[in-house]
Amino acid sequence: LDKAALDAARACGLQLREVELPDWPYESLLPILVCEAASAFEDLTRSNQDDSLAWQAPEAWPNTFRQSWFIPANEVIQADRFRRRVCAMMHTLMEPIDVLITPSLVGPTCLITNFTGHPGLTLRSAIGPEKKPHAITVIGKLFDEATVCRVGAALERRFDVWHLRPPVGG
C-alpha cells in the first residue's frame, strides 16, 4: 500500500528520493512529554482529583502524571539537549526537500515531529486488507503548512478514497 502511495506521489509530479533518519534513541525524548503533560495537570494531581478519572490502569495518564514526579531533572535536561540535536538533524534533512512522505504511525517520525514542531498531515491513502483504512503522513518544513496542505490535497485527489468508509462493526 505504501508503494501505491509513492506511485501516486510520482503521478502528482513529485520527484521522490529516499532519505534515512539517523538510528538514534528517539524514545529518550519521552521524559519531556511526560513532564510537560504532568505539569499541565499538576493541580489535578496535587488535589487528588486525578483519582476521579475513569481510566486508572498502570499506563493511564493519571499514573503517568504521578510517576513523572520521580523523573530526575538531569534526565529531562539531557532529553532536552537531545531534542535540540533532533531539531538540527530534521532541519538538515528537510533543507533539500519540500515534504517527507512516510507511513503513518510506523517508525519514529510521529515522535520526532511531536518534539520538533514540523507540520504533518495524515491522510487515508487506501483501503487495505479487511477493508481497513491505510494512511500516510506528509511532513513539511517548519512553518510551511501551505506546502503540506497542497501536497496532501493533490495526493487525496489521486488516492480517491476520501469517500470510502470501512464497514461498521468490523
Image (cartoon, rainbow, N blue to C red):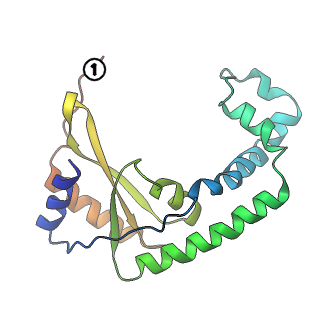
Please name the residue shown 43% across and 76% down the image.
Answer: 93
Q: Residue furthest left?
A: 11
Q: Residue furthest front?
A: 23
- Residue 89 x, y percent position in the rendering: 52, 75
Above or below 44: residue 39:
below
- Residue 45 x, y percent position in the rendering: 83, 35
Q: Residue furthest bottom?
A: 96
Identified by mark 1, the residue type is Val
The part of the image, by quadrant, that contains residue 144 is bottom left
Q: Give the quadrant of the C terminus.
A: top left
Does residue 140 appear left or right of residue 135 in this picture? right
To which residue does mark 1 refer? 168
- Residue 151 x, y percent position in the rendering: 27, 65
Q: Relative to the observer, which residue lies in front, 117 or 3?
A: 3
Please name the residue shown 67% across and 20% down the image.
Answer: 54
Please name the residue shown 24% across and 29% down the image.
Answer: 166
- Residue 157 x, y percent position in the rendering: 17, 55
Kind of element beneath mark 1: loop
Above or below 149: residue 2:
above
Q: Residue furthest right?
A: 46
Counting labels gives 1
The part of the image, by quadrant, that contains residue 165 is top left
Q: Relative to the observer, which residue lies in front, 14 or 168?
A: 14
Q: Relative to the observer, which residue lies in front, 60 or 144?
A: 60
Please name the residue shown 45% across and 58% down the image.
Answer: 109
Does residue 107 appear left or right of residue 50 in this picture? left
The part of the image, by quadrant, that contains residue 133 is top left
Does residue 7 appear left or right of residue 43 in this picture? left
Callout 1 environment at 10 Å: few (<14), some (14 to 19), or many (20+)? Answer: few
